[in-house]
Image (spheres, rainbow, N blue to C red):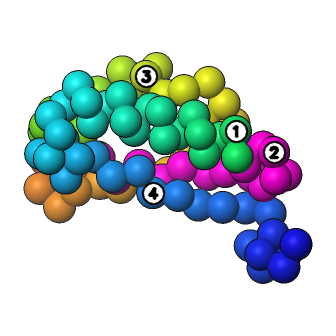
Amino acid sequence: SWYRQQINRKQYVMIGYSDSAKDAGMMAAGWAQYSAMEKLIGLCESQDIELILFHGRGGTIGRGGAPAAQALRSQPPGSLKNGLRVTEQGEMIRFKFGLPQVA
């Protein structure tokens, strides 16, 4: 199709965490995000499109922040097949990268 050619068979989708957790609560938001990722994986596979999920996690638990290993283990099967992208929230940049030895 025209769209598949335009995107070179790669679709990037950002999964946002902080607003959904504020609006629906952490448990409901987490389940909705997981379900949405499962549906996106199935749709892209059926259309021969590579899905790359881009995670917009915050620094605090309420904004989607969690240890990286825990966050990766909680992803639906197949969601990491084409790679992983994440954002780093502004309040976390100084905390994680503010020292020359870790920058």
Q: Position of residue 60 (x, y in %)?
A: 13, 39
Point out the tag, 1 or 3, that comes first from the N-terminus: 1
Q: Does the magenta stretch include residue 36?
A: no
Q: Is residue 55 magenta?
A: yes
Q: Residue type at mark 4?
A: Met
Please provide the residue range marked out in magenta. Answer: 44-58
| SS at mark 3 in the image | loop
Which callout, 1 or 4, points to the residue nearer the camera?
Answer: 1
The disc label shown at residue 74, or none: 3
Point out the tag, 2 or 4, that comes first from the N-terminus: 4
Residue on which the image places disc 1: 42
Residue on which the image places disc 2: 46
User: How far apart in space, not on screen, are marks 3 and 4 (Cα)?
Assistant: 16 Å
Q: Which residue is drawn at 57% across and 34% down?
A: 38
Which callout, 2 or 4, points to the residue nearer the camera?
Answer: 2
Q: Position of residue 95 (x, y in %)?
A: 13, 47
Location of the C terminus (image quadrant) = bottom left
Residue on which the image places disc 4: 14
On screen, residue 103 above or below 22: below
Q: How many labels does the image show?
A: 4
Q: Which of 73 and 25 is in front in this view?
A: 25
The reply to whether dot 2 and dot 1 touch (C-beta < 8 Å) is yes
User: How far apart in space, not on screen, are marks 1 and 3 (Cα)?
Assistant: 18 Å
